Image: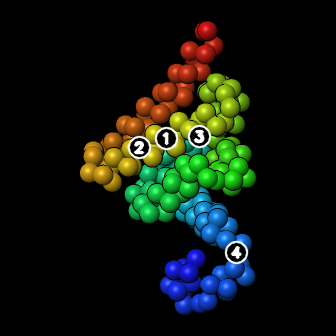
């Protein structure tokens, strides 16, 4: 906290007027980073009237482009969400996603496109896949050009919709 105070040009006591400690400060940074990430994705042109497939594709593309443009922001969010020291109330929960994101999954289930699985299953599959693709790109793996972004989305869509067919037959 003393390093933060020094960098900010304030006394350490001033920081404690706003935050209970390091954990509270990091929790607040996370909340702001998550809100910024969500808003920047929505600002990329989210059309709530599009089909489930098109909304999911728009979200896929927006997150990938946003993650590549702001890698430090996303790495912080991912590191925070992976930390074993987090308070349960601060962990990102599928229920706290912005309404447009939740609606994609609800609509997919209601329209019979996706099996009725917990939303966290879809979120984990989506976020895990995006995260790995972008991390590989940033670490000099395959370049995420428009063609690969679209091809990887087709794989995601096939997995979501194929799963609904497979679950119905079992």
Asked if marks 3 and 2 touch (Cβ < 8 Å), the reply is no
Q: Is disc 1 placed on a helix, strand or loop?
A: helix
Q: Is disc 2 placed on a helix, strand or loop?
A: helix
Asked if marks 3 and 1 touch (Cβ < 8 Å), the reply is no
Q: Is residue 153 above or below residue 25?
A: above
Quarter holding the N terminus is bottom right
Name the residue: 69% across, 53% down: 87
| Residue underneath mark 2 | 132
Asked if marks 4 and 3 touch (Cβ < 8 Å), the reply is no
- Distance from label 3 to label 1 (Cα)? 8 Å
- Give the number of the disc on residue 128: 1
- Distance from label 1 to label 4 (Cα)? 32 Å
Earlier in the chain: of badge 2 and badge 4, it is 4
Query: Residue 53 in the image: x percent, y percent?
Result: 55, 37
Asked if marks 1 and 2 touch (Cβ < 8 Å), the reply is yes
- Distance from label 3 to label 2 (Cα)? 14 Å
Closer to us: 77 or 63: 77
Quarter holding the C terminus is top right
Q: Is disc 3 placed on a helix, strand or loop?
A: helix
| Residue underneath mark 4 | 19
- Give the number of the disc on residue 60: none
Q: Is residue 150 above or below residue 115?
A: below
Earlier in the chain: of badge 3 and badge 1, it is 3
Earlier in the chain: of badge 3 and badge 2, it is 3
């Amino acid at each position: 906290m003393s390093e933060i105070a020094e960098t900010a040009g304030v006394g350490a006591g001033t920081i404690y007027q706003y935050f209970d400690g390091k954990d509270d400060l990091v929790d607040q940074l996370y909340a702001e980073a998550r809100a910024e990430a969500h808003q920047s994705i929505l600002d990329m042109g989210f059309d709530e009237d599009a089909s489930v497939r098109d909304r999911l594709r728009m979200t896929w593309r927006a997150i990938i482009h946003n993650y590549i443009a702001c890698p430090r922001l996303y790495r912080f969010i991912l590191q925070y969400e992976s930390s074993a020291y987090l308070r349960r109330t601060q962990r990102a929960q599928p229920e706290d996603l912005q309404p447009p994101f939740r609606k994609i999954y609800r609509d997919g289930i209601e329209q019979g496109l996706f099996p009725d699985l917990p939303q966290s299953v879809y979120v984990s599959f989506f976020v895990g896949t995006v995260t790995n693709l972008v991390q590989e790109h940033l670490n000099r793996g395959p370049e995420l050009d428009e063609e690969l972004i679209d091809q990887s989305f087709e794989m995601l869509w096939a997995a979501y919709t194929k799963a609904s067919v497979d679950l119905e037959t079992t």
